[in-house]
Amino acid sequence: MSRSSSTALFRPAAAERRNRQGSPASLSVDSLRVKADALRGHLDALLLATLDGRELHGYAIIEALQLRSGGALDLPTGTVYPALRRLERAGYVRSEWTTVSGRQRRTYQLTSAGRKALSAERAAWREFTTAIEGVLGSGPWPAKA
Amino acid sequence: MAGQGVIDRYLLTLDARLRGPATVRRDLLAEARDGLHDAAESYRAAGLPAGEAERRAVTDFGPIGRIARDYQAELAVAHGVRFIRSLLLVIPIMHVVWELTRVFWIGGWASGPEWARTVAQAADLTSWVIAVTAAVILLAWRVLARRIGDTRLVGRLASAWAVGAVGVYVFTLATHLAILVAVTRLGTGGFPPPVLVATVFSLVVTARLVSQARRCFVLVA
């Protein structure tokens, strides 16, 4: 498995924030950034989605999360590895040490239980966003006649 | 630490804070090392000098206290599972050792009073209940891991079970030994060497179990 092409372009969210500190743009960017606390309940599902249909090593998973979220996910990258172990313990992913680009790396892939769990998470998420969109996205109530 | 990079120093500090099964610890740290070097490489590719790239990779990885807490929780769970497996193995082995010792060197329960047989059977049953519970926990491990997402809570539950199970097991073993000494011919005839060997073996194994159960408790604290 080769490294993702985003590697050279990728700048982890926290580093990007530090670069922008003090500039007016940093305020608006930070307000959109999804904090670690808010992510906690969704991290497992996000990791499963990142592994959907492919086998990745830990850092490639972090890159993929950042890439798909547009750099908005702000969590310490070191927390991803224990989360992957937790998913492995639950039987949702399996891992093995393989040689990637000449280096030994632990790579992860979904199990059939992991694919089922991901489908359930996606269905629950669609249901949730549809319900929230129905309330938040519909604008003000029509004025009473 | 002179001459070491920022990543090496971070990993050494992290390693110093972790306690638990050496193979799992090495595995976790090897993966962390890979991730940190990948991140530093990514920063270098974006044009940063090597030292700064490593510093940023380490900062992104997270504060060492938080990361150590997460990693320690994994190690505590790994130790807990190993302990449950070893208990599942030890109980049948101890049972076979004592059954053989009793049959060949001590004699049946028929010569002893009725209460001694009842108490011994109750003690036997208790140790088998512990073994069966351990087997059920291992069989349901994935389901438990799915239901309880918090790794630290999984570790605490495993350590609480380990301490309780070993406490009960030590009590049943002590009961067995006391009955043997009190109601069989050991009371008058002394300990034949094979019985002495079985007793010493039991005490050594039990001491090891107590130590490992205590370690479960320490690792999760």
Image (tube, coloured by chain):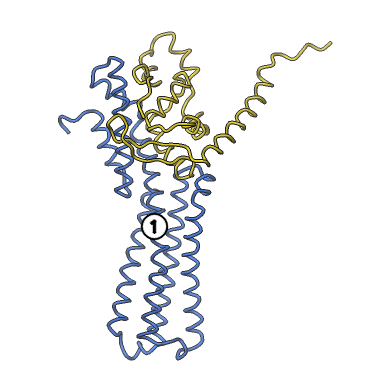
Residue B180 horizontal/vertical position (percent): 40, 83
Image quarter hosting the N terminus of chain A: top left
Question: Is B173 located above or below residue A23 in the figure?
Answer: below
Q: Chain B is drawn in which colour?
A: blue
Residue B191 horizontal/vertical position (percent): 30, 84
B138 or B184: nearer the eye? B138
Question: Is B167 located above or below residue B109 in the figure?
Answer: above
Q: Which residue is drawn at 39% across and 44% down?
A: B74
Image quarter hosting the C terminus of chain A: top right
Helix, strand or loop status at disc 1: helix
Q: Residue at x 38, y 11 (%)?
A: A22
Q: As shown in the figure, which amino acid type bears the numbered disc 1? A: Phe
Q: Which residue is drawn at 32% across and 76% down?
A: B198
Residue B186 horizontal/vertical position (percent): 35, 87
Tell me which chain the residue with mark 1 is part of: B
Residue B98 horizontal/vertical position (percent): 38, 77
Q: Residue at x 43, y 87 (%)?
A: B108
Tell which residue pokes out farthest to the left in this image.
B2
Callout count: 1
Residue A80 occupies quadrant: top left
Tell which residue pokes out farthest to the right in this image.
A145
A107 or B75: nearer the eye? A107
Residue B95 occupies quadrant: bottom left
Which residue is denoted by mark 1 in the rendering? B83
Mark 1 closeness class: few <14, some 14–19, many ≥20 residues within 10 Å: many
Taking the image as shown, residue B165 lies to the left or right of residue B64, namely right
Tell which residue pokes out farthest to the front in this image.
A1
User: Any idea which chain is the yellow one in this picture?
Assistant: A
